[in-house]
Amino acid sequence: MTTAIDCFARYGYQGTSIDRIASAAGVTKGALYYHFRDKEELLFEAVKDRIAEFEERVVGSVSPVTDPPAALAEIARVCVHIATKNNLRRFILTLMVEALDTNPRLSQAFRDILRRFRSYLAGIVRLGQEQGVFRSDVEASRAAQLFAGGVIGAELQHYQDPERVDLGVVMQGVVDQLVSWLTVDADQLPHGVHAKRGARNNRRESR
Amino acid sequence: MTTAIDCFARYGYQGTSIDRIASAAGVTKGALYYHFRDKEELLFEAVKDRIAEFEERVVGSVSPVTDPPAALAEIARVCVHIATKNNLRRFILTLMVEALDTNPRLSQAFRDILRRFRSYLAGIVRLGQEQGVFRSDVEASRAAQLFAGGVIGAELQHYQDPERVDLGVVMQGVVDQLVSWLTVDADQLPHGVHAKRGARNNRRESR
DNA sequence: GGCGACATACTGAACGTTTAGTATGTTCGA
DNA sequence: TCGAACATACTAAACGTTCAGTATGTCGCC
């Protein structure tokens, strides 16, 4: 199964034949069919395995959360680690994109995992807001979407262009940027942001 | 060719058979081979077309740049538009991810386009720094990576979960966050960011 | 105008290869 | 001996590509 995970991560589901997995694992197709009903069952088992690992790694790494900025930084570090030291993130991203219009059931599984991830992140943001560390005029779910998106975008750019995109540095930037944004009060935005400032003030007053 | 673009955007290259394109276009496979040498030539023509369109749309939309924050906001708006009104962004993202380990030549094409995009973004950030609108202690290329990553992450989350992820709102957040980060001076970060503040001060002094 | 020669844009069938899956055979340990 | 865990040989369908043939358009010559 480890071999299947590696092949799916690199070539995707459609691009990975049973023969490829079998020969990479040094067994025959028949042996694979002994263990798995069909190709799709192999895929789903692999996905289940990787999703469980991801959630254990991410959620497990910062529980309980007491310091929200440090927690976000730690999650970013874990993501950098799993993106560079093994293929867990690559697996998830590759198959998530592939599944969008080709496999509704798989797409739903990935939707769920990302929803849980964002929900977990939103919890951290909310804790920061309760502690007064983060400002309260931002919806926690929006901040979570930004963070999750930043993580995904950083990883994809790194996979695509490892020479130019240092994942650790970009991911640190993702955290810095979000934490900075969540800790800046609208009153303290520097002068020179003309239209921006006006828009922000309007938002405050409507609350 | 329009049909091929649509199929590639949704199902990827491997997941799109010549038969599928042919029947979707209402012609035979032979007719496709009359026009294109092979499946891969069709792919490359499609990619060339979409890349040209993307660059025209994005770069063309905010030239010349005089107001960097507004330019970034406009680029985000253009990305939202093309991501929701046609399949251009979907095409690029789907094939970019698929090409990572399956097609080195195509992967290079996508690396190039993303490098150009980031380079363009970095130019806007640098202009903002020269104008004194953006702070100068951030490398423009890093800011560009963050913005590009934010855009990609927002789009992917939206494609995956359109119910929960409003692309316009998240993309606006991407811009707000980056502009806010680029316009906050380290001295003006609010109190209460203990470890963070220390780290930032050290960085200033080493300069 | 008509016709032959040629070009263009297809068609349906055929080709060779690859795919996921299946049927049957083999080996080894309990 | 039996059954788990394979291996081998095979199948039907799908894949990308090619082929011979067809329909239509264009051009130049008589």
Image (cartoon, coloured by chain):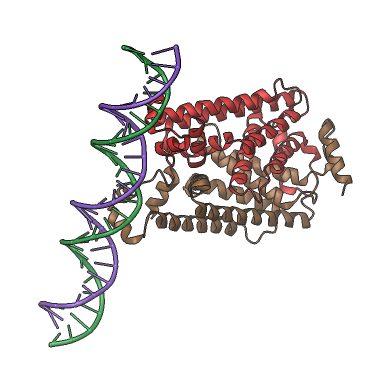
Chain colours: A red, B brown, C purple, D green
Name which residue lies at 50% across and 39% down: A97
Residue B94 image point, x, y percent: 49, 45
Name which residue lies at 59% across and 52% down: B114
Q: In screen coordinates, is C18 left or right of B200?
A: left
Q: Nearer the viewer, residue A3 or A140?
A: A3
Please identify the quarter of the rendering in which residue C25 is found: top left
Please identify the quarter of the rendering in which residue A82 is found: top right
Residue B108 image point, x, y percent: 55, 54
Q: In screen coordinates, is B18 left or right of B9?
A: left
Name which residue lies at 52% across and 39% down: A94
Q: From this view, report whether residue A193 is shown above or below residue A68.
A: below
- Residue furthest out toward the right: B205
Q: Nearer the viewer, residue B111 or A182?
A: B111
Q: How many marks?
A: 0
Name which residue lies at 47% across and 47% down: B87
Residue B162 visible in rendering: no
Residue B5 image point, x, y percent: 42, 51
Q: From this view, report whether residue B103 is shown above or below residue D5.
A: below
| Quadrant location of the N terminus of chain B in the rendered image | bottom left
Q: In screen coordinates, is A70 left or right of B38?
A: right
Residue A43 image point, x, y percent: 45, 31
Q: In screen coordinates, is B40 left or right of A55?
A: left
Please identify the quarter of the rendering in which residue B154 is found: top right
Residue B170 visible in rendering: yes
Q: Nearer the viewer, residue A77 or A135?
A: A77
